[in-house]
Amino acid sequence: MAKRKKRAVAYVRVSTASSAQLHSYEYQEQYWQGKFTDDPDTELVGIYADRGISGSSIYKRPQFLVMMQDARDGKFDIIYTKSVSRFARNTVQLLEAVRELRDLGIEVIFEKEQISTMQPTSELFLTIAATVAENDLQVDSERQKWSFRHRFESGWISIGSGMYGYTMTKDNNLVIVEEEAAVIRRIYNMYISGMGCTAIAKVLNEEGIRTWCGNEWKPTRLLELMANEKYMGDSMMGKSVTVDGIQMDNMDGQYGKRYYMEGTHEGIVSRETWELAQQIREQRRNKKIAGSKKPVYPFTSMIECGCCGKHYQHKVNNSGKKWRNDIWACATQLRKGVAECDCTRLKDSALREQFIAAYNQFVRERPQGHDTAALQSVVAELRKEESDLAELLMQRLITESAFRAEQRRIKAQIEELNIKINEQRGKIVRESDFTIITEFDPEKVEKFITKVIVRRWTVTFVFYNGVEITRAYTNGPSGNQVGWKQKKEVAAWQ
């Protein structure tokens, strides 16, 4: 009877998910397939590959987790991988994984270090190798931090890999891109003349003008643009720092020193124009200074029609009378009638009642959504991907055009995530805010809710971390109930 061959698999992790590094995976695939072509004792039965995923945690790598489950199901006998750093950089997670595999009778072979997990001394060598890999990450991080601090102190400035209106020369000078600068000046002028960011974004998008990454303009992006001191010729470095692999906002200086430098380059707008824009921005943000004459209700501008996409507006029926009724209705329906949008209206009292129930459910269950830390973690991984991409370019493993195309893709994703992060940062919720309520509290709406979506007889509350809670609602007894008209007539005489 012929001896059964060992069933082998290979685990591969490449640094980026870009097409520019596809050849890296293909090379490794060919390598492992070729390795066992003439092996009489072993056959390759599969390759598990995670692309563009950090090696810091095995729990963030889908193919690694699939491989572990297949191991439990007895689908192979041995795992080959190039090195410990490709398999896992976290020492504890590495040892947990190889111990489980060893208990299952599955051997792991690390080619670079020449370690087999079936060797008695393997754990010692693996611990050393994984610790070195972890330390390399930490040392590299600290080296980068020191390098940035030193360059900031020397007057070095940075705009990352791109900034609308400017380009960076090789000798660290910002040079104006006049076509884009004209758009910047126009944005400031529209804002100072009284236009809001939503209106400005609409104008730019309708004219087909796009951001540096090729995306449509959004109000939050415009607010960031107008608050950027580089457009008047100054530079602040250290606005964000990386803490434990996560990009953190350092605008208040709590994570490290910031460096403000005046007149580092030619401004696109004058200092007077920039400062005037900041004054207007602060006035609009502060309702007391703005002196708005229109009454503001807790859910103003937050309610969206789930049928046509327009906003709901506040409306008062029978104003000044005892049977006054505050309701919310779709703007399309109010202007054009139910033929255009038949989404249901809802009383303000019903909305408040359902908010109390949804909010209390959120406080009790603490559901996890796409919170800021998670989004920042994704941004950090994308920045690492961008750094790896630059390394490939320096090693001439990819072309300049391929690098630029992939860089724009990454920057576009980062821009979208930063917009979401900034939107969430507008909702500052502390642990002390998580309290059960029995009466409506408008401050809870402001802190916890980003959007309300009304569909036919349901209302969905979207919380600051992306969690959605949907409640069915009713507006209560109809005004046509028996005796209602008589009660109205009696009240009129009183």
Image: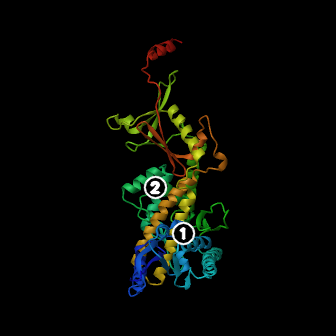
Q: Distance between the residues labelled 1 and 2?
A: 36 Å
Q: Hey, which residue is sitting farthest front in the picture?
A: 1
Residue 385 x/y as whole percent: 49, 72
- Answer with mark 1 or mark 2, whichever residue precedes in sequence: 1
The reply to whether callout 1 and callout 2 are in contact (CB within 8 Å) is no
**In the figure, residue 276 lies in which quadrant?**
bottom right
Q: In terms of secondary structure, where does tag 2 sit?
A: loop
Quarter the N terminus occupies: bottom left
**Residue found at x 59% / y 42%:** 444
Q: Give the residue at mark 2.
A: 218
The front one of 489 and 449 is 449
**In the figure, residue 311 lies in which quadrant?**
top left
Q: Hey, which residue is sitting farthest bottom in the picture?
A: 38
Q: In terms of secondary structure, where does tag 1 sit?
A: helix
Residue type highlighted by circle 1: Ile
Q: Can residue 290 be seen at all in this image of the molecule? A: no
Q: Give the residue at mark 1.
A: 58
The front one of 372 and 223 is 372
Q: Can residue 369 be seen at all in this image of the molecule? A: yes
Residue 34 x/y as whole percent: 39, 85
Residue 161 x/y as whole percent: 49, 72
**Residue found at x 62% / y 78%:** 123
Residue 358 x/y as whole percent: 54, 41
Residue 353, above or below 190: above
Residue type highlighted by circle 2: Lys
Left or right for 161, reference 123: left
